[in-house]
Amino acid sequence: MVTVFSSLMIFSGSFAFAQSNHTEFQYESISGDEIKSSSVAKQMLEKIKQSKQILKELQAGKHLEKTSEQLAIDEQRKLSQEILQKQLDRMNKDYEPYTPQNAFATFLGGVNATHHGLYWDQFNYVDSKVKVARAAKQMVLDNGGTYHDALREYVKYASMTRVEMIQFNEELNIKYGFSDSEIQKNFDKFGKLPRYD
């Protein structure tokens, strides 16, 4: 025989009231061959078996059968995603001339063709620095960093010192034959010729 105590607490303002009830429950123990013959025991065992299966599926990440509402929502999501993708494709096509590469190519249309390689190398170098900086910024944000920290990381990777810029342009001038290494040796690290008094 098991005795169960239940309590009820009611809070009202600064007063608390409690009530106790003594209720006795009786239960029967079924074991052995009695389980096989008892319809109640069979039903309970079947429910336990179903509960274990549901728990197993939930732990495995499987979803139970979807309701008609869930299926309708999934269908609406799929339709919305398709509409969004069509609009994005249309927008990308409409704004294709304004992408950085295409805008820069338009700019180079007015520049002497002998300089195009040098300009494209400069553009690609800066573009790659910006992509790395964006990735670094996103990594900070994904790891829970603040926007200020992410922006600082972006600037760290996207920026270029004056000395680095001069060195890079010096290398490009040599690469494209606008200068040679002997001439470049006359310039200091700031890109200036020495002055003699």
Image (cartoon, grey):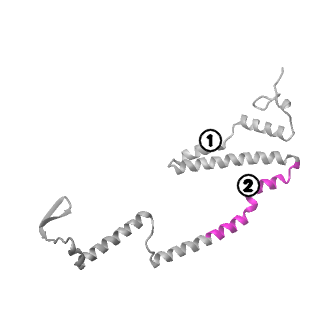
Question: Dot 2: few (<14), some (14–19), or many (≥20) neighbours within 10 Å?
Answer: few
Question: Dot 1: few (<14), some (14–19), or many (≥20) neighbours within 10 Å?
Answer: few
Q: Is residue 163 left or right of residue 146?
A: right
The secondary structure type at the circle numbered 1 is helix
Quarter of the image with the C terminus is top right
* Residue range highlighted in magenta: 84-113
Quarter of the image with the N terminus is bottom left
**Residue 168 % position (x, y):** 76, 38
Q: Residue furthest front?
A: 33
Query: In the image, which disc is placed on residue 130?
Result: none
Residue named by callout 1? 156
The secondary structure type at the circle numbered 2 is helix
Q: Is residue 35 in sight in this rendering? A: yes
Q: Is residue 92 magenta?
A: yes
Name which residue lies at 76% across and 61% down: 97
| Disc with the residue nearer the chain's start (2 vs 1) | 2
Give the camera-side residue of 194 and 182. 182
Give the camera-side residue of 1 and 140. 1
What residue type is disc 2 on? Pro
Give the camera-side residue of 28 and 4. 28
Total numbered labels? 2
**Residue 62 % position (x, y):** 45, 67
Q: Is residue 59 left or right of residue 97?
A: left
Q: Is residue 112 in sight in this rendering? A: no
Residue named by callout 2? 100
**Residue 73 % position (x, y):** 50, 74
**Residue 166 % position (x, y):** 76, 36
Q: Vertically, is 27 above or below 119?
A: below
What residue type is disc 1 on? Lys
Q: Is residue 174 magenta?
A: no
Q: Is residue 139 left or right of residue 52?
A: right
Examine the image and state in which quarter residue 6 appears.
bottom left
